[in-house]
Image: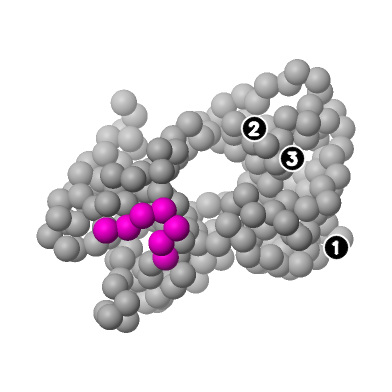
């Protein structure tokens, strides 16, 4: 087992013990810009029958960062070196920060992953071709991943919303954090780089889950 995974398992055990005492904290993860590809987009960009090469596993079950990177072209500018995350999905989705969206000239649309209706698009450029998107570009809404068991530690279930607080030099309260609980999730609070920078949040920081009456 990798050292990072050992640390994560120790943290989860500690958080479970704290939750049993009604002290609620969750680990943060900062998500940089990235791309999820559909099978047709993958083959258009890399060639028929191409298979993504795993770079490293991610904390969410069966998710991984890939060796492959792409270029995205927006109305104003382009951005190179955007990493692909695997495995392939049913629809292509690109997640940027608000700062990225302004630079690229893309209308900033905040959505949960998979909610792609009426979102902007753009052009992807790969080593073997190009792929035009009519939709699929989003700014990901801050959300909390958890297995059903982990969500139960906090008295939460899939679809709930919570508030979380980052204390410190820049104390920030994040409201309307959607809970995504299920077998394909593991306890982790996901921020994009803009959100993390605003509150000086780093990977593995522990944030407090705040009850409504404590705000």
Q: Earlier in the sequence, mark 2 or mark 1?
A: 1
Which circle marks residue 76 in the picture? 1
Q: Is residue 160 magenta?
A: yes
Q: Mark 2 sits on what residue? A: 88
Stretch of the chain drawn in magenta: 155-161
Colouring style: one colour
The residue sitting at 19% across, 63% down in the picture is 23
**Residue 82 appears left or right of 86:** right
Location of residue 16 in the rendering, given as x and y in whole percent from the top left corner: 20, 50
Image quarter of the C terminus? bottom left
Q: Is residue 24 magenta?
A: no
Q: Mark 3 sits on what residue? A: 70
Farthest residue toward the left?
Answer: 21
Image quarter of the N terminus? top left
The residue sitting at 68% across, 49% down in the picture is 94
Residue 21 visible, this orientation: yes
Q: Earlier in the sequence, mark 3 or mark 1?
A: 3
Q: Quadrant of residue 213?
A: bottom left
**Residue 215 appears left or right of 23:** right
Label 3 sits on a secondary structure element that is: strand
Label 2 sits on a secondary structure element that is: strand
Q: State the separation of the CA atoms marked 3 and 2.
A: 15 Å
Q: Earlier in the sequence, mark 3 or mark 2?
A: 3
Residue 206 visible, this orientation: no
Which circle marks residue 164 in the picture? none
Q: Quadrant of residue 184?
A: top left
Q: Is residue 195 above or below residue 153?
A: below
Q: Are marks 3 and 2 in contact (CB under 8 Å)?
A: no
Between 55 and 111, the one nearer to me in the picture: 111
């Amino acid at each position: 087992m990798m050292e990072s995974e050992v640390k994560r398992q120790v943290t989860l055990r500690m958080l479970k013990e704290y939750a049993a005492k009604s002290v609620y904290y969750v680990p943060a993860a900062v998500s940089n810009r990235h791309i999820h590809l559909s099978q047709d987009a993958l083959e258009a960009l890399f060639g028929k029958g191409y298979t993504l090469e795993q770079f490293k596993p991610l904390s969410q079950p069966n998710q991984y960062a890939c060796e492959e990177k792409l270029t995205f072209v927006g109305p104003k500018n382009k951005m190179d070196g955007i990493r692909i995350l695997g495995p392939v999905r049913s629809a292509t989705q690109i997640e940027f920060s608000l700062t990225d969206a302004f630079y690229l000239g893309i209308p900033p649309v905040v959505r949960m992953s998979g909610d792609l209706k009426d979102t902007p698009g753009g052009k992807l450029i790969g080593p073997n071709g190009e792929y035009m998107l009519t939709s699929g570009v989003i700014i990901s809404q801050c959300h909390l991943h958890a297995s059903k068991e982990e969500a139960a530690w906090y008295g939460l279930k899939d679809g709930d919303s919570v508030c979380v607080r980052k204390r410190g030099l820049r104390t920030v309260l994040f409201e309307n954090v959607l809970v995504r609980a299920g077998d394909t999730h593991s306890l982790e609070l996901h921020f994009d780089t803009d959100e993390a920078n605003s509150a000086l949040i780093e990977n593995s920081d522990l944030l407090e889950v705040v009850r409504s009456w404590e705000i």
